[in-house]
């Protein structure tokens, strides 16, 4: 029993890392562009699907397929930002509709290129190692390592480079940043591209763990949104919240059906929102 | 204003008169009109929330599903009549809407959207998982009880009677909503859309206005759900799905938000389009995605917005209703 518990807990930690990749993308995109990107789950799915196609049909190495898929999704997102969102950034009401339209398109595109099948991506590394007496698949530990690498890279990029400084400045005050000579359009494009790259990376890393399906983004989108709300749209908050919710859900899923675990985390989210309500409402009213 | 009411009554009358003529017309059209009326109720209910108070909810299918299952299960399990079953369905929807509304409408716009998206996914997976109650993806079917109005009973299994049942619900919903929208409360709704901060300065309770709009719109959406269950004598977990949540947004944007008619117009266009295009292209939703983006870019007020602009632009009256 203890072993199963530990196993799900470790699984939850790895899942938390992948969720925080996706949630970070959502947060940065919202922070810069004021876009609630409903299409983010589709970007995650498209990342997994493209890497699967590169892996299966072009017989490429898993890691090369991963990098290619991240590049493709990132470029696609940069273009989409210019074509779809550019003029309306800042208005939640309009961009939400745009992102719903985008989600519909991308979902159907996923269906066209992948079909309705459910496929399993073989892990690039087989075998297991013993962690605290629990046999744990080696790929998942590797995936965790790569996710941590990505998180570190994002942290370094945002907090230690001058471009990151411009991004954070734009998040704080769009007009002021623009007045100081920061090219907002370029920053938005970069941000949306970065969000897409992160979502695709999450999708590829998750592909050998969960199965690849054109609707696979729905599950992670829900938990990412929960995490984003609890983290109050701050980057650090999102990562911390995903480390609270993902292991919790994974452990709870041992005792209940997965959906009940999700309901419990939703209720937990509501409780947290209600208790930290004043902060949440004033903060967002100010910025909306 | 009076001219507008006359046109509206004329359209309603035309909808009622052409039904017997179209009934014998080749297959699909009549059945399409039935669905269009129900979708019209759904769209108008959503429009109250989206078009009038500018709260973009992505969670309306939760109430649609609850309305459908509330009706269906009370007929199946308690052998309830038509109106009692409808009442139970709407009661369930109202209770859930109040519970959700109490915390959801307090949130700022972006949080509200996110919360409704989470809710709709949770509702969908719950419905899919509780196969014992909902029948899951296969759904459950019922024998719809006759609509009893005092002494006379109507069976909805007669297609024409069924049509008139949906038509009367459509008309009643439309005029109730029109009454609400033109009342004092409706003015507050429009004020919330136009400038939420000023609503508070003027001494109105912003959260209260949003909450009332949310609950009212949920109840009407629940009614549409019950009518769907009546129409197809069946209900499945797919009513809870995100696709059904996206539909009213498409209709409102397409037809023109904040006009009530716009949602119905959008639903009709959508249904006709779906009817003709889905037969030769399965992925027709792509077109709607493109359409949503294009309309938002070129004419955010939809088709009726363009029409209104033409008329109002000529008579210089556009300050009154904007």
Image: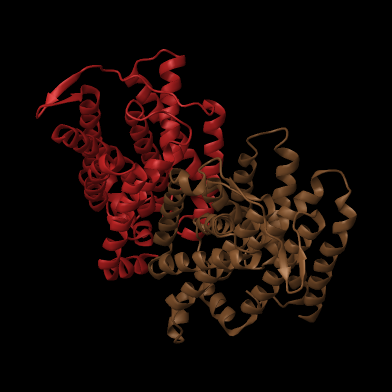
| Point 78% across, 63% down: residue | B164
| Point 57% across, 62% down: residue | B222
Residue A35 at what x, y percent from top left? Answer: 44, 53
Q: Is residue A55 visible?
A: yes
Residue A120 in the image: above or below residue A41 = above
Can you say which quadrant of the picture contains the C terminus of chain B? bottom right
Residue A258 in the image: above or below residue A115 = below
Of the pair A144 and A68, the residue shown nearer to us? A144
Tally the marks. Answer: 0
Can you say which quadrant of the picture contains the N terminus of chain B? bottom right
| Point 23% across, 46% down: residue | A248
Q: Is residue A39 visible?
A: no
**Colour scheme of the rendered structure:** by chain
Of the pair B320 and A144, the residue shown nearer to us? A144
Residue B115 at what x, y percent from top left? Answer: 40, 57
In the rendered image, the residue lying farthest to the bottom is: B203
Residue B18 at what x, y percent from top left? Answer: 87, 59
Residue A283 in the image: above or below residue A121 = below
In the rendered image, the residue lying farthest to the left is: A132
Residue B270 at what x, y percent from top left? Answer: 69, 49
Of the pair B7 and A147, the residue shown nearer to us? B7
Residue B157 in the image: above or below residue B320 = above
Q: Is residue A265 left or right of residue B246?
A: left
Report the chain shown in brown.
B
Of the pair A218 and B295, the residue shown nearer to us? A218
Report the chain shown in red.
A
In the rendered image, the residue lying farthest to the top is: A59
Q: Is residue B264 left or right of residue A265?
A: right
**Residue A11 found in image quarter:** top left
């Amino acid at each position: 029993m203890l072993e199963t518990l530990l196993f799900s807990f470790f699984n939850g930690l790895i899942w938390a890392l992948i969720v925080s990749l996706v949630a970070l993308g959502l947060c940065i995109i919202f922070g810069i562009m004021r876009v609630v990107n409903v299409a983010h789950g589709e970007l995650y799915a498209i990342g997994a699907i493209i890497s699967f196609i590169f892996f299966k049909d072009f017989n490429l190495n898993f890691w090369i397929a991963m990098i290619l898929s991240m590049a493709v999704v990132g470029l696609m997102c940069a273009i989409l930002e210019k074509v779809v969102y550019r003029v309306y950034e800042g208005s939640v009401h309009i961009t939400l509709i745009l992102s719903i339209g985008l989600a519909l398109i991308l979902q159907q595109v996923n269906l066209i290129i992948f079909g309705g099948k459910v496929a399993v991506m073989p892990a690039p590394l087989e075998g297991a190692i013993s962690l605290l007496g629990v046999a744990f698949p080696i790929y998942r530990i590797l995936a965790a390592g790569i996710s941590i690498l990505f998180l570190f890279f994002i942290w370094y990029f945002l907090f230690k480079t001058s471009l990151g400084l411009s991004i954070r400045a734009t998040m704080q005050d769009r007009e002021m940043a623009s007045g100081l000579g920061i090219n907002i359009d370029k920053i938005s494009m970069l941000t949306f591209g970065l969000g897409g790259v992160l979502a695709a990376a999450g999708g590829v890393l998750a592909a050998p763990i969960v199965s690849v399906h054109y609707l696979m983004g729905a599950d992670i989108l829900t938990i990412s949104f929960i995490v984003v709300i609890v983290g109050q749209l701050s980057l650090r908050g999102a990562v911390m919240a995903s480390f609270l919710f993902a292991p919790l859900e994974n452990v709870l899923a041992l005792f209940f059906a997965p959906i009940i675990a999700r309901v419990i985390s939703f209720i937990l989210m509501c409780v947290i929102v209600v208790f930290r309500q004043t902060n949440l409402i004033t903060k967002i009213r100010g910025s909306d | 204003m009076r001219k507008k009411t006359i046109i509206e009554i004329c359209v309603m009358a035309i909808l009622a008169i052409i039904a017997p003529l179209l009934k014998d017309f080749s297959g699909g059209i009549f059945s399409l009109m039935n669905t269009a009326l129900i979708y019209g109720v759904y769209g108008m209910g959503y429009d109250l929330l989206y078009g009038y108070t500018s709260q973009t909810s992505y969670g309306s299918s939760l109430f649609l599903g609850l309305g459908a299952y509330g009706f269906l299960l009370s007929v199946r399990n308690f052998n309830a009549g038509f109106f009692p079953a409808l009442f139970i369905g709407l009661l369930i929807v109202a209770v859930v809407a109040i519970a959700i509304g109490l915390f959801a409408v307090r949130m700022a716009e972006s949080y509200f959207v996110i919360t409704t998206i989470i809710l709709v996914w949770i509702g969908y997976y719950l419905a899919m998982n509780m196969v014992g109650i909902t029948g899951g993806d296969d759904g459950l079917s019922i024998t719809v009880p006759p609509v009893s109005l005092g002494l006379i009973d109507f069976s909805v299994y007669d297609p024409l009677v069924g049509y008139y049942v949906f038509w009367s619900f459509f008309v009643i919903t439309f005029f109730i909503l029109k009454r609400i929208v033109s009342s004092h409360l409706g003015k507050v709704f429009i004020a919330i859309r136009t400038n939420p901060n000023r609503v508070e300065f003027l001494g109105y309770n912003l959260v209260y206005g949003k909450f009332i709009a949310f609950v009212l719109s949920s109840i009407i959406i629940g009614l549409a759900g019950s009518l769907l269950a009546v129409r197809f004598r069946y209900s499945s977990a797919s009513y809870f799905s995100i696709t059904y949540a996206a539909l009213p947004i498409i209709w409102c944007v397409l037809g023109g938000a904040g006009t009530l008619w716009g949602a119905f117009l959008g639903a009709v266009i959508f249904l006709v389009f779906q009817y003709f295009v889905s037969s030769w292209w399965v992925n027709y939703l792509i077109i709607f995605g493109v359409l949503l983006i294009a309309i938002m870019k070129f004419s955010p007020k939809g088709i009726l917005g363009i029409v209104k602009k033409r008329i109002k632009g000529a008579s210089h009256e556009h300050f009154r209703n904007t």
